[in-house]
Image (cartoon, coloured by chain):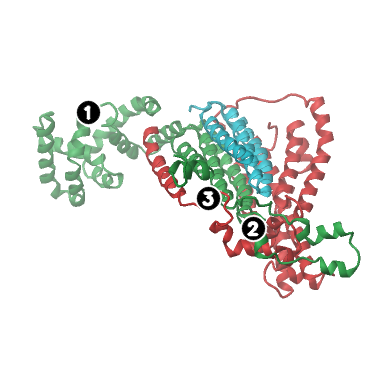
Amino acid sequence: MKKISLIPVLLVGALLVYAAQDFPEWGSPNSPASQSPVSSHFIANTGVDTEVPNMVTAVLADYRGFDTMFETVVVFIAGMAVLAILKNSSKKKAGSKEFEVDVEPDLIVTNTVRLLIPVIQIFAFYVLAHGHVSPGGGFQGGVVMGASFILIALSWDLDTALARFPADRCTLVAGLGIVLYAGIGLLSMFLGGEFLDYAELAQIFPVSREMARYHAMLGVEIGVGLTVTAIMFSLYANLSTEGRLKGGL
Amino acid sequence: MFEEGAIINELFIERLNYLIYVVLLLIGLHAMISKNNLMKKLIGMSIFQTAIILFYVSVGVKEGASIPIYLPEHDPHGSHVSLGAGNETEEASHGPVVLEAGLIKKYANPLPHVLMLTAIVVGVATLGLALALCQRIYQGYGTIEEDEILAKIEREEMRAHPSVAVKSMESSKPATSKVKKPATKSKESSTLSAKRAKSNPKTKAKTAPSTSQLKSSRSKSASSQPKTSASKSSSAKAKPATSKPKTKAKPQAKPKAKTTARPKSASTAKKTAPSKAKPRTPKK
Amino acid sequence: MGLELFNTFILLLLVVAAIVALRVKDLLTASVVFGVYSFLMCLLWAEMGAVDVAFTEATVGAGISTVVMIATIFNLKRKSSD
C-alpha cells in the first residue's frame, strides 16, 4: 500500500517540478501575477476609492466583499455542522478516553489569566478596528477574541467559559454577524446602489462617499469578527467535550 | 552547474520556494494516501493546504517591495499627521492620489494575500468539521485506524446481511487462505464467466458454457474430478461467479436450492473463522 | 543575501517539521509539531511581505487549530499506528 501510493505521488511531483521551471523567477516584479491589471488597479486606486491605507482590508471587505461574505457563511455552516454532528452523539460510547482531568484550577494559572484576558480582548478589538491601517481585520480580531474565551475554558474549566458565553448565544452571535454583513449590503442596495456598494451609504450618513466605504468596511469587519469569534469558541467547546458541553479538557 | 539557465540554478536558487511548495504538497498528499490514522491524514491535509497557500503567496512576492499598506506619502491620513492637519488647502493638496505606474512596483501584490487570508480561516473551520467527524467515527467504531474501521464495517455487514456476507466472503476466500488454485482459476475463467454472466438469467442456457468452463479449469489445475456434473457444475459456477462484481453475482445465487444450502453452511463456518482472522490479515 | 539565507533556512526547516509531524507516533506530539510548522509558515509569510496572511496564520493555524486538534485527541486515542 505504501509503495503503491508513492507512484501517483511521485508522478504528481514530477509534473509539478517540470511545471515549476516555467514559473517566473521568485520575487520578480515583472511576473504575470504582479503585472495583471486587476492587482495593479487595486494598488493604484484603493487610496482614492476608499481612503483605506491597508489594501488587503480594502480588497477583502470592499472590492471582493461578496466573496468574503460567503467565506463567512462557510465558517458559519462549518460551525453549525459540528454542532449537528456532535449533538446527542455521546450516548453510545465505544472507546474509552485517554485521560481524565478533574483537578482544581491552578491558582497561579488562573491569576495570570485573569490579568491576561482583558488585555487579549482589548487587543482583539484593536486588531478588528485598526485593520484599516495596519495588519488585521475581522478574521484576525475574531480569532483572537475567540481564543480569549478558549483560554478561560483551558485555565478554569469549560463551565466558567460557558457561563460568560453560553452555547446558544454562540449560535445567535454567529448568525448575527452574517446578518450584519448582509444587512449593510442590503442597505446599500435599498439606497439605490448594488449589493455591498457601500458608497451609497453616504446618502444617510454625513460623510463623503469614500469615507462611507471606509466606515461600512468597519461594520462589515465587525460582522465577520462576531461570526468568527462565536464559531471558534463553539468549535472548541464542542470538540473538547464531544458535544456534551460539560467537563472537557 | 550554477551558471545561468542550468537546472540546478533554475530550481534551487531562483525557484526554491516553488520547489519547496512541491515537496510539501507531496508530503501532504502521500500522508493523505498512505497514513493509516485519520488524525495523521488530517495533518497531511493541512500540510497540503498550507503548501498551496505558500505557492499563492510566493507568486505575489515582489523583490524589494513594501507590504501592501500605503506609505505615509501616499496615504491621506498619514500625511495629515505629518503635516499637522490644518486648513483645507493643505488637505486638498495632500488628498489621496492614484499611484502612477512606477510606484505600483513598490507594493506587494495584495490579491493573493486576500484570497489566502480567507482560505486559512475557512480551512480551520473545515478542519474542525473533519475533527468532529473523527470523533463521531471513534464513538461508533472505537478506533481511528483506517484498517480496523474497515474490518469492523465488514464484520457488521456480515452480521446484518448474511447473503451479502456470503458473497463478500466467497470473493475474499481465494485471496486469503483456503486454496491457492481457485485464485488462478478464476483469473483464467474470468473472461468466460463474464461472457456467461450476460446470458445467465436464463437458467437453461448456462449448462453448456459452464461445462466448458469447468473443463478448462480442470485441465488447468487438475483439481477434483466432477463426476456428478449437476451439483459440481453448480458449485463451480457459483464460485467464480461470486468472485465477480457483486451486482452480477446476485441473480446467480438465487435459482438453485442446492447452492443456497451450501453457502449457508459455509457462512456459519466462516462466521466463526474469519471474523477472528479477518482483522488480523490487513494489519501487516 | 541575508534575507535569502533566512528564506532558505525557514523553507528547509518547514520540510523537516512537516516530516516530523507525520512520522511521530504520538498524536499529541504530532499536533504540537504541526503548530511549530504553522509558526514557521507564518514567519515565512511575514518575510515575504504578506503581513495579513502571516497574522491570520499565527492566530488561526498555530493558535486555534492546534488547540482544537489537542481537544480532539483528548477524546480519542493518543497513540497512532504509523
Amino acid on which disc 1 is placed: Lys
Q: Amino acid at mark 2?
A: Lys
| Residue at image point 21% right, 48% down | B197
Residue B168 falls left or right of residue A129? left
**Colour cyan maps to chain:** C
Q: Residue furthest front?
A: B3
Q: Nearer the viewer, residue B233 or A200?
A: A200
| Residue at (77% x, 70% y) in the render | A209
Q: Which mark is residue A40?
A: none
The Cα–Cα distance between marks 3 and 2, rounded to whole angstroms, is 15 Å
Q: Chain of mark 2?
A: B
As displayed, is residue A89 above or below residue A215? above
Residue shown at the point (76%, 31%) measured from the top left: A155
Amino acid at the residue labelled 3:
Glu
Q: Which residue is mark 2?
A: B105
Would you say residue A136 is visible in this rendering? Answer: yes
Q: Mark 3: which secondary structure?
A: loop
- Circle 3 marks a residue in which chain? A
Residue at 70%, 58% in the rendered image: A55
Measured as percent of width and height from the top left, residue A143 is found at 71, 45
Chain shown in red:
A
Real-space CA distance between mark 2 and mark 1, rounded to the nearest whole angstrom: 70 Å
Q: Which residue is tagged 1? A: B180
The residue under label 3 is: A25
- Where is residue A120? Give x, y as percent: 79, 41
Give SS at disc 1.
loop
Q: Quadrant of residue B47?
A: top right
SS label for mark 2: loop
Q: Which chain is green?
A: B
Q: First in sequence: mark 2 or mark 1?
A: 2
In percent of width and height, residue C8 lies at: 57, 38
Q: Is residue A193 above or below residue B130?
A: below
